[in-house]
Image (tube, rainbow, N blue to C red):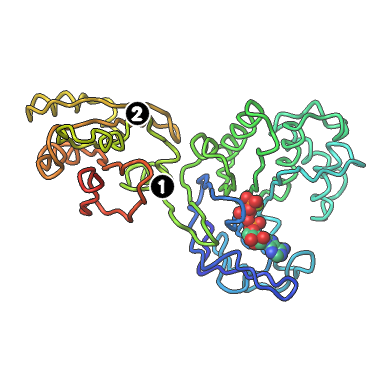
């Protein structure tokens, strides 16, 4: 539904070049909720503003719903007619709502309908329908100043839906809201996604947002996409930074071993295991113990619901070095579990492949 290819944005300000986007390839599938996370300055807002051509990318292409927007003329408020038309099918929700205080709630939702040239009666009908959709049917005549933050954002969402968009872009739509209100606005976005088949691309810095509503996610760093994929795919990817942030695992870290000093160091292997899909409900650890005769110690464990699915994580300890544990680790992997070797706390993180001998023993 949205594909960016080699998207680059360089801002020139006061003789200096700032590269905000550096070759971003992103693919958002039709009907999914896609979350983009990253630190401040990573380029998230630049990405979203380039997707609807509020900013003209320096290079690269943006295709939305089969249409190459970068090939259409104009930008920002000076967009040509074709680009304006294409853009009316892309809704945009902002962090600070951007409502006009001089217009009623209904008047705010009617604004884009006026721009689209709908006659008065039709505008009023459509605006009331949209307000019903976001749960504000009773507030059509209120003024923005009379609404709570959550209600204002609902007006912002109703307004974004005026052009019957296939795509909704949201830049930190919930970051000015308290946790409870955030949850209700996210639930609304999820409902709209399902009811209207709306594709949602949302920017956030809260991992909880990704956890609650996103089907897929990307991590941006320094203008690049560092990781991306479906949330369940990321959780199943060894070494995924997003997976670790989505589902942090407490429990003992291998760092404690170094402190055993001169005493006999017990050979052991610490392993992080992620259960997802059907493996979540199976007693695989006790099977491992029985079938392989291995004494498994559990150092930490947690269950969570991510993207509507149960996911479990467990940090376990196996006797012997990693080389001695090829069979039990193979046993778990064969059964669809993701098995990772956590690095010692504070140790630099090496790029990981399952075969890299980045073991606990090595970091001692
Ligand atoms: N209009 C602009 N002119 C010059 N530099 C800009 C402009 N907009 C953004 N930048 C720079 O581009 C980089 C990316 O900014 P961007 O706003 O896309 O980051 P972000 O990920 O949205 O950050 P935040 O989480 O703080 O909103 C930053 O270094 C920023 O200073
Ligand atoms: Mg931003």
Q: Residue 261, position in %: x, y? A: 23, 35
- Could you classify mark 2 by the number of other residues whose Cα lies within 10 Å: few (under 14), some (14-19), or many (20 or more)? few
Q: Is residue 338 left or right of residue 75?
A: left
Q: Nearer the viewer, residue 18 or 71?
A: 18
Q: Is residue 285 left or right of residue 67?
A: left
Numbered tag placed on residue 251 in the rendering = 2
Against 179, is 4 above or below?
Answer: below
Q: Residue 59, position in %: x, y? A: 58, 74
- Real-space Cα distance between discs 1 and 2? 18 Å
Against 3, is 296 above or below?
Answer: above
Q: Nearer the viewer, residue 56 or 340?
A: 340
Q: Residue at x 33, y 56 (%)?
A: 351
| Disc nearer the start of the sequence (1/2) | 1
- Could you classify mark 1 by the number of other residues whose Cα lies within 10 Å: few (under 14), some (14-19), or many (20 or more)? some
The residue at the far bottom in this view is 15
Against 61, is 344 above or below?
Answer: above
Mark 1 vs 2: CB contact within 8 A: no
Q: Residue 348, position in %: x, y? A: 36, 51
Q: Which residue is mark 1?
A: 241
Residue 52 visible in the displayed image: no
Q: Residue 138, position in %: x, y? A: 80, 25
């Amino acid at each position: 539904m949205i594909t960016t290819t080699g998207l680059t944005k360089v801002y020139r300000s006061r003789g200096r070049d700032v590269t905000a986007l550096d070759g971003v390839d992103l693919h958002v599938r039709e009907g999914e909720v896609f979350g983009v996370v990253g630190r401040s300055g990573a380029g998230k807002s630049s990405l979203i503003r380039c997707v609807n051509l509020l900013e003209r990318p320096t290079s690269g292409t943006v295709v939305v719903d089969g249409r190459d927007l970068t090939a259409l003329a104009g930008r920002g408020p000076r967009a040509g007619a074709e680009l304006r038309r294409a853009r009316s099918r892309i809704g945009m929700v902002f962090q600070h709502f951007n409502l006009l205080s001089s217009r009623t709630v209904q008047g705010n939702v009617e604004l884009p309908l006026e721009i689209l040239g709908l006659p008065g009666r039709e505008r009023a009908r459509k605006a009331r329908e949209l307000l019903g959709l976001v749960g504000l049917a009773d507030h059509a005549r209120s003024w923005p100043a009379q609404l709570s933050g959550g209600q204002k954002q609902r007006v912002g969402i109703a307004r974004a839906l005026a052009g019957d968009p296939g795509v909704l872009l949201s830049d930190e739509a919930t970051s000015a809201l308290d946790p409870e209100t955030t949850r209700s606005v996210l639930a609304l976005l999820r409902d709209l996604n399902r009811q209207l088949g709306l594709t949602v691309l949302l920017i956030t810095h809260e991992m909880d947002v990704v956890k609650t509503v996103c089907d897929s996610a990307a991590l941006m760093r320094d203008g690049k996409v560092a990781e991306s994929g479906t949330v369940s795919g990321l959780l199943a990817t060894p070494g995924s930074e997003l997976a670790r942030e989505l589902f942090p695992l407490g429990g003992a870290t291998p760092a404690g071993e170094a402190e055993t000093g001169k005493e006999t160091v017990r050979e052991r292997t610490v392993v992080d295991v992620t259960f997802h899909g059907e493996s979540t409900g199976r007693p695989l650890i006790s099977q491992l113990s029985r079938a392989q005769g291995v004494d498994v110690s559990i150092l930490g464990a947690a269950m969570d619901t991510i993207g509507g699915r149960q996911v479990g994580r467990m940090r376990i300890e196996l006797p012997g070095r990693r080389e001695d544990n090829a069979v039990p680790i193979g046993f778990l992997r064969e059964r669809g579990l993701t098995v990772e070797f956590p690095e010692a706390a504070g140790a630099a993180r090496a790029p990981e492949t399952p075969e890299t001998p980045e073991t606990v023993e090595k970091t001692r």
